[in-house]
Amino acid sequence: MMTPMTTEVDRGNMKSAVVEIDGFRGELINAGHADYDIARAVWNGAIDRRPRLIARCIGAADAVKAVRFARDHNLEIAIRGGGHNVAGTAVCDDGIVIDLSAMRGVRVDPANRRAWVQGGALWGDVDHETQPYGLATTGGIVSHTGVAGLTLGGGVGWLMRKHGLTVDNLLAVEVVTADGELLRASEREHPDLFWALRGGGGNFGVVTSFEFRLHSVGPIVLAGPILWDATDAGEVLRFYRDFVRDARVELGTVVRFGAAPPLPVIPANLHWRPVIMVGTCYAGPVEDGEQVLRPLRAFRTPLLDLVGPTPYVGFQSALDSTVAHGWNYYWKSTHLPELRDDLIDVIVEHAFSSSSPRSYAAMFHLKGAVGRVSEGATAFGNRQASHAITLDAVWRPGEDFGDRDTAWTRRFFAALGRFREGVYVNFLGGDEDPARVREAYGDAVYDRLVDVKTTYDPDNAFHHNQNIRPGGLLRLPTAGRRH
């Protein structure tokens, strides 16, 4: 039997009384707790929400108890893995945050190339444990990204063209459903739920652990960025378009438009200079990568060429300081087709007109293994797109760039309108038109997701996300538990 809240919470000023959940072994944090402000903070410093309770779980059983407690007490539910999503969905106002951040365990089976990862782990945790064996799976481009959020939305990263998206390497999960039941989902067990979890985001439950397929990668890879002056951006993009069209799938690239960040590996005279930067990572033998990358490295005269043999685990964390916790972020994003000249012209016109030196745009080359998986095989949509671009306004607390750079992202996004081909759900912000969620999947995949949502969460208890509403839900979501 659940122990109810011992006294009422004053919702107006958040003066909370002691709360207990029977059998919960983790930490319960409310507004009276010394760590409340730290615990409610997420990566995006622009998010300022005050949950009624943060239930910091230490295992799957805690997550079960927290979900049941939330449903029994009609509480809004947010789910926190790494807390890295730009929309801030990991924290809610006046509800319960089911916080997995203490659950960061990773277990590796090198012989069978498998890894089991808890739901609060970060990608740096995974790389730390797998790279001693020369193994990895696709895991984003920033090491403090959460495993859960990136995986459930699809999983774009350096290795995707060779080894597929993160969801293409997901073998099974343990998930707490809206009924408070702990299920294992895989191709054989609850396959409909497993299909939906591979791209459908946090709509279907609290995933407490993941099982991944690993691949031979590293520990040394050929990787690094090449920088050209922003005035060369048009010519660089035209060359890049032709270069990546038939590039080997081992080559992952991300193009970054903005000021050169003040990283130790970048000479001081280039810090804050507007540049186009092509980041590269070759998921194959270093000597092969050197041959593949030679034409790109020789194009015009780069300001800086940092490509070289480097530890994969270090390369995965190289950009961490450029997207620090607690800074303010506002994103707009879309998928794009191959880079036609008129599209390149639009990108060049807008990419360098932000106000904050920390704002940037980033364009990910897809194709390869991403597009070889048939549309609808997983819930990740728009697999045939060539690129995903994200327009990222970034400013530190106290700086006054917010309004200007938010407007910059919106202008840039509007200018890309006729080229849009869907969107990566993990790049959606917190103020999107709900129609963009359907755009992230396409009609057929979205309608199937609605069916799965209706089966596993008919009351839309898990709606603090890029929401897929269950069929027949004509009222606002409630947290009440089914009986």
Image (spheres, rainbow, N blue to C red):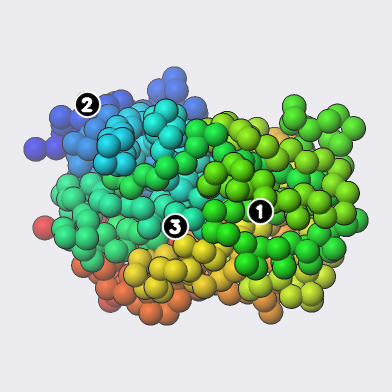
Query: Looking at the figure, which quarter contains the N terminus?
Result: top left
| Residue 281 seen in the figure | no
Residue 292 - label: 1
In the rendered view, would you say 278 is above or below 422? Answer: above
In this view, the residue in front, 58 or 458, is 58
Residue 26 - label: none
Image depth: mark 2 or mark 3 in front: 3
Circle 2 residue: 25
Tell me the amino acid under the disc marked 2. Answer: Arg
Tell me the amino acid under the disc marked 3. Answer: Gly
Measuring 88% from the left and 49% from the top, which residue is drawn there? 301
The answer to whether 122 appears left or right of 269 in the picture is: left
- Measured in 3D between alpha carbons, the distance from the residue under mark 3 to the one under mark 1, in whole angstroms, is 20 Å
The quadrant in which residue 193 appears is: bottom left
Helix, strand or loop status at disc 3 = loop
Query: Looking at the figure, which quarter contains the C terminus?
Result: bottom left
Helix, strand or loop status at disc 1 = helix
**Residue 344: horizontal and vertical position, in percent?**
78, 69
The answer to whether 261 appears left or right of 424 in the picture is: right
Circle 3 residue: 164
Measuring 32% from the left and 30% from the top, which residue is drawn there? 105
Measuring 29% from the left and 32% from the top, which residue is drawn there? 107
